[in-house]
Structure formats: C-alpha cells, structure tokens
Amino acid sequence: MNVKENVQQILEHFHIEQFQHDLIDWFRTEQRNLPWRKNKDPYKIWVSEVMLQQTRVDTVIPYFYQFIEKFPTLDALADAKEEEVLKAWEGLGYYSRVRNLHAAVKEVKEKYGGRVPASKEQFSSLKGVGPYTTGAVLSIAYGIPEPAVDGNVMRVLSRIFYITDDIARASTRKKFEQIVSCIISHDDPSDFNQALMELGALVCTPKNPSCFLCPVQRHCRAFAEGVEAELPVKTKGKAPKHVAFRAIVLTNEEGKIRIEKRPSSGLLANLWQFPNDEHAPTPNEQAFIKEISERYHVVLRSIQRIGTFEHVFSHIVWHIEAYKGNALELQIDDETNKWVTVDELNQYAFPVIYQKIWQAYE
C-alpha cells in the first residue's frame, strides 16, 4: 500500500469539516497572546518560527522582542554584519539557524526586492528553509494551505489518528504532511496550523495530556482506545558523547582579556571563546600552562581554578574545567585572536558555557 492509499484509509470515516470547526473555534478563544501573532508580517513570522525550532516559547519571547527591535525589517537584518546578528542571537543556541536565516534574507533582498516570496518553490529554496518553515510562514502570513508538520504536530496527529509509525523516520513525517494536506482548512489555513501547534503546546502535551480539556477529544482515536499516553512512538537517538577539556580567562598587564574566534564551520561556528585545549586535553596543570603558552604565544606562569562547567548539546556534552591567569603577550592581535577590554568583550557573541565562565570569573 502506498502513502496516498494509506492516508485515504486513515481518513476513512473521519469528520474533517467538524474537526476543523472544533479546532479553529477553540484556537480563536484560547490562543496565547504572542508577539509574532500581532500581525501577518511574513518577516516577523519567519524570525519567530526559526527561533521556536528546538526552543521553548517562554524563552523565545524576550529574544524575539530584542531581535526585532535591533532588526525591525528584513532589509535591516540583510544589511547587518554577522557579528551583530550572532550577538543578538547569543544564548538562544543552535546558531546555524540564525546564520542560515541571515543568508536567506540577504537572498530575499537581492532576488525578491526584500519581500518574502509567497511561492512555495521560491521560499523553500532559501537557505535553511525546510518543509515545516515553508508551511508555517506561507500559511500564517499568506493564507496558503500548506502543511506545517513538526514534532509537536506529529504528536497530536499520532494520537488523533492512532498512528504507531516511528515519528523519527522521514517517511512518517511525509505521511503526516499528506494527512494535513487533506484535513487543513482552505478557508483559514493560518488558524488551522497554529491551532494544531497550540493544541500540542497547551493540551496534547508530551506527558499527561489534558484529554478532558481537549476541543477535539471526540475525534481522537487514541483517547477512545485509552492509549494516548503511549503515543507518539519514537526511537531514541544515540547517547551523547562526553568531552572534557580546559579553558582559561587570560588577562595581560593592561587588564585586557584574550579571546579567539571559533572556526567558520562546525559546532558554534564563528562565535568567540576563551583560550582552551579543546582539541588536545592536557593531563595536568603544568602541561596545560605549557600548551596554552605555546598555542597562544603568551608567557603564562601560574593559573587559578575557577570551577567546572557543563553544556549539553544534542549529540555531545562538554565538561570544561575553567581557570584564570595573567599572561605576558608575545604576539600582536589578528582577526581571530584579540586582546579586548571588559567593555569591548560585550560586543562579541559567546556560547552560553563561556558566558557562565566569564560570570564566575567576575
């Protein structure tokens, strides 16, 4: 049985129009007052959707206000320097999201006169724009009936339709996209897609869903069978790799701080950090002093421990032993290694774990 036939079978005896009505009616009454819902500006909706990937709404709201205040229009973001953009994103994590967004808005300015394209083909071809972002922006901003299927939506629909396929598989996502294409409201695709997202956030939550408050409970097959808590089915990924290394807050005789820029590709690309031995952890403090002195062309005589810090990424866990020390510089600054004042330090974007190290140092 192909996907289309399978979806037709799933939707057999499902009351699509009544489901649309129940869902959208609830959303119009119960939706949260979120800043990106104040108007249909496609640029602001796009920014919000990028921020909301892998980040909670409560965390995103203050970042959204700050980001839009700094870059109020698409042109403003397109014209900004990468350093400014990364600094505005600092603390949100998953920095590839904002680098892709920055590249994409530049393309929109150059190719489409600064107007976010309403064409699925054009918008989805932009850097970092996948099927979910395409569906979310086009449906919410332009009222185009495109499915917007993320993990939240798959959880909701797996329960409503009692689907036990593994949602970690790409084929399952495609099946859900087909289902949404069939059940989406063509009269109001914006509210329909937002309602599915809102339902997952407020009612059909990962654990302990509030089924007795659910506006579409009568349509839910998993609830009818009493198995809503067992869905969705998702295979667990590999356990993250643990990496331990050391970092140091170095000051010179003028009280300036030594910082370095991370590589332009890979994890936390183009962000700034303090000197460290990330790629070759040293066994003891004397070896660490020698390593830092040679790698960063300084004379470092002694160090003092600040503490141990941990940061969890999706695939790796960093354990950083942090130190502070005073150094005599032997090399002039370049573009990727600088001595900066404490005030200047605030102009550079650092990963969260290095912000914590700095706070502990202060």
Image (cartoon, rainbow, N blue to C red):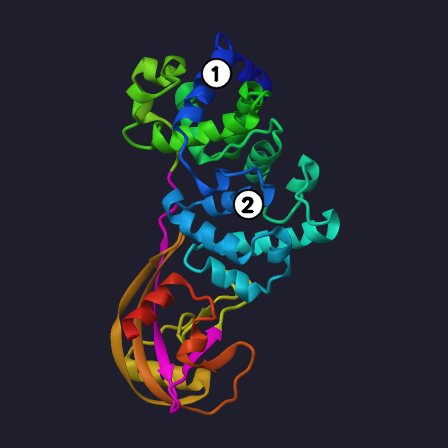
Compared with 4, 359 (above or below) is: below
Check if residue 240 falls in the magenta segment: yes
Residue 212 is situated, as x and y percent measured from the top left of the image, at 29, 19
Quarter of the image with the N terminus in it? top right
Of 314 and 23, nearer the camera is: 23
Quarter of the image with the C terminus in it? bottom left
Residue 285, image quadrant: bottom left
The disc label shown at residue 21, or none? 1
Of 117 and 354, nearer the camera is: 117
Q: Answer left or right for 42 relative to 307.
A: right
User: What range of the chain is rendered magenta?
Assistant: 236-260
Compared with 79, 50 (above or below) is: above
User: Are dots 2 and 1 in contact, CB under 8 Å?
Assistant: no
The residue carrying mark 2 is 44
Residue 248 appears in view:
yes
Q: Secondary structure at mark 2?
A: helix
> Majority secondary structure of the magenta segment?
strand
* Amino acid on which disc 2 is placed: Lys
Residue 312, image quadrant: bottom left
* Amino acid on which disc 1 is placed: His
Residue 164 appears in view:
no
Residue 354 is situated, as x and y percent measured from the top left of the image, at 37, 67
Q: Answer left or right for 155 relative to 103.
A: left
Crowd rating for badge 1 (residues with CA inside 10 Å; few <14, some 14–19, many 20+):
some
Crowd rating for badge 2 (residues with CA inside 10 Å; few <14, some 14–19, many 20+):
many
The residue drawn where x is 40% and y is 70% is 278
Q: Answer left or right for 313 relative to 87.
A: left
Residue 307 is situated, as x and y percent measured from the top left of the image, at 25, 71
The residue drawn where x is 53% and y is 32% is 148
Residue 141 is situated, as x and y percent measured from the top left of the image, at 59, 36
Q: Earlier in the sequence, mark 2 or mark 1?
A: 1
